[in-house]
Image (spheres, rainbow, N blue to C red):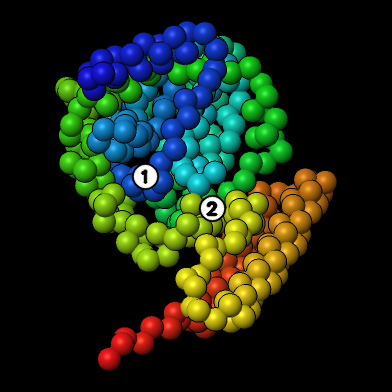
């Protein structure tokens, strides 16, 4: 099947999904998307438009590409947009589709800007059937739009990381309120958003490999309108761009080990790390007793490491339950998440060092003596 036909069928599927009920299209990528680029928000085109931030999408043919931020008419009065987000799980990064609903839910703790600073939405609110815009974080012409207010928002997030979990990802977990939002009635991206995504996918300039993380079309005033006065280019990439094939983690020797898929380089929680599996048997050295002894040492080490892993996972899960029972604030939850990430990474680093130390003592095969 040609790429053009495949993209057309995918587009039809997206339209069908958006017109029926909320759903997710799962795609797993072994490395996270580039950083969020730096750009300004175009002027709001009119009353009732809600800002939907830009994000990196993925195509199997050419990798990550930028979907510009844009203003979208809310499908229903009172509905807000929860952005989509990339998150680590099951050995890869998965994209969680955004949706419309009466409240803003969890979007990975990612700071997209313009009111989306990792939790909730500070860009506006619905009141008596009209959307009121916060001019402190939105670009609104008060001559044409009178339903505005001005409330300063303090954004403590300074990074531009575009994914949750994994190597270098955001360490954030959903609050109890965000988990409740996940069970509310949702509306999938509307048809104008689907068309917007398709237009971005077909534009070679928006591919990360072409723009180096600095897309020439970072945001648009209206969906799928990629030319004219409402188009905004990125000022800069959010971080130095690394091509997929040249990403540092892809070239590290330990990344090629069989464990690499189940033991991510930067896990946020012990629950994200699968138990250690027995390695393949070492080559026959010709000394059966020595080989058996080494295999027993490997088994003992793996059993000890898996016990430590299980104990840490139970401890972290108990702390999550305590936070929920005490209704802890977001600052306390974030502090605990950072502690969990540090604990997990230290454990994985210690286990890796132990395994390497044992491998250095692995017996070597004896060379057979050549006849003279």
Residue shown at 44% from the left, 22% from the top: 50
Q: Is residue 312 above or below residue 121?
A: below
Instruction: Look at 68% across and 72% down and name the residue there.
Output: 300
Residue pushed farthest right?
A: 325
Pick out the residue farthest to the front.
Answer: 372
Q: Is residue 291 above or below residue 336?
A: below
320 left or right of 138 in image = right
Q: Position of residue 240 (x, y in %)?
A: 27, 56
- The residue lying at 68 percent from left, 34 percent from top is 179
Q: Is residue 143 visible?
A: no
Image height of 230 relative to 75, above or below: below
Q: Which residue is located at x 18 percent, y 41 percent?
A: 210
- For residue 352, which numbered disc appears in the image? none
Which quarter of the image is occupied by the C terminus?
Answer: bottom left
- As drawn, the label of residue 262 is 2
Q: Is residue 69 left or right of residue 169?
A: left
Secondary structure at numbered mark 2: loop
Residue 210 in the figure: left or right of residue 316: left
Badge 2 or badge 1: first in the primary sequence: 1
Measured from the top left, where is residue 115 in percent x and y?
A: 47, 37
Tag 1 secondary structure? loop
CA distance for labels 2 and 1:
20 Å
Q: Nearer the viewer, mark 2 or mark 1?
A: 2
Residue under label 1, please give it: 33
Q: Position of residue 1 (x, y in %)?
A: 26, 18
Residue 199 occupies quadrant: top left
């Amino acid at each position: 099947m040609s790429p053009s036909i495949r993209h057309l069928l995918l587009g039809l599927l997206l339209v069908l999904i958006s017109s029926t009920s909320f759903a997710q299209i799962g795609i797993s990528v072994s490395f996270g998307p580039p950083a969020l680029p730096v750009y300004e928000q175009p002027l709001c085109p009119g009353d009732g438009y809600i800002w939907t931030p830009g994000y990196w999408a993925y195509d199997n043919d050419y990798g990550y590409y930028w979907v510009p931020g844009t203003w979208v008419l809310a499908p229903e009065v009172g509905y807000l947009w929860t952005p989509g987000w990339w998150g680590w799980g099951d050995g890869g990064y998965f994209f969680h589709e955004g949706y419309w609903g009466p409240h803003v839910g969890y979007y990975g703790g990612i700071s997209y800007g313009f009111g989306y600073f990792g939790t909730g939405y500070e860009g506006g609110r619905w009141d008596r059937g009209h959307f009121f815009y916060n001019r402190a974080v939105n670009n609104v012409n008060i001559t044409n739009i009178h339903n505005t207010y001005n409330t300063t928002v303090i954004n403590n997030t300074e990074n531009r990381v575009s994914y949750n979990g994994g190597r270098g990802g955001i360490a954030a977990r959903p609050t109890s309120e965000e988990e409740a939002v996940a069970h509310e009635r949702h509306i999938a991206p509307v048809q104008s958003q689907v068309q917007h995504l398709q237009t971005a996918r077909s534009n070679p300039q928006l591919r990360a490999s072409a723009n180096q993380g600095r897309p020439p079309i970072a945001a648009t005033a209206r969906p799928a309108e990629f030319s004219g006065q409402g188009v905004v280019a990125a000022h800069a990439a959010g971080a130095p761009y690394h091509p997929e094939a040249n990403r540092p983690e892809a070239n590290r020797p330990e990344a090629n080990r069989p464990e690499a898929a189940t033991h991510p380089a930067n896990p946020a929680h012990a629950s994200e790390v699968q138990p250690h599996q027995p390695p393949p048997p070492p080559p026959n050295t010709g000394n059966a007793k020595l080989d058996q002894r080494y295999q027993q040492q490997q088994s003992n080490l793996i059993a000890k490491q898996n016990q430590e892993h299980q104990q840490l996972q139970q401890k972290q899960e108990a702390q999550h339950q305590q936070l929920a029972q005490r209704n802890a604030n977001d600052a306390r939850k974030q502090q605990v998440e950072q502690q969990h990430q540090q604990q997990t990474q230290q454990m994985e680093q210690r286990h890796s060092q132990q395994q390497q130390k044992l491998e250095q003592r692995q017996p070597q095969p004896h060379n057979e003596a050549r006849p003279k």
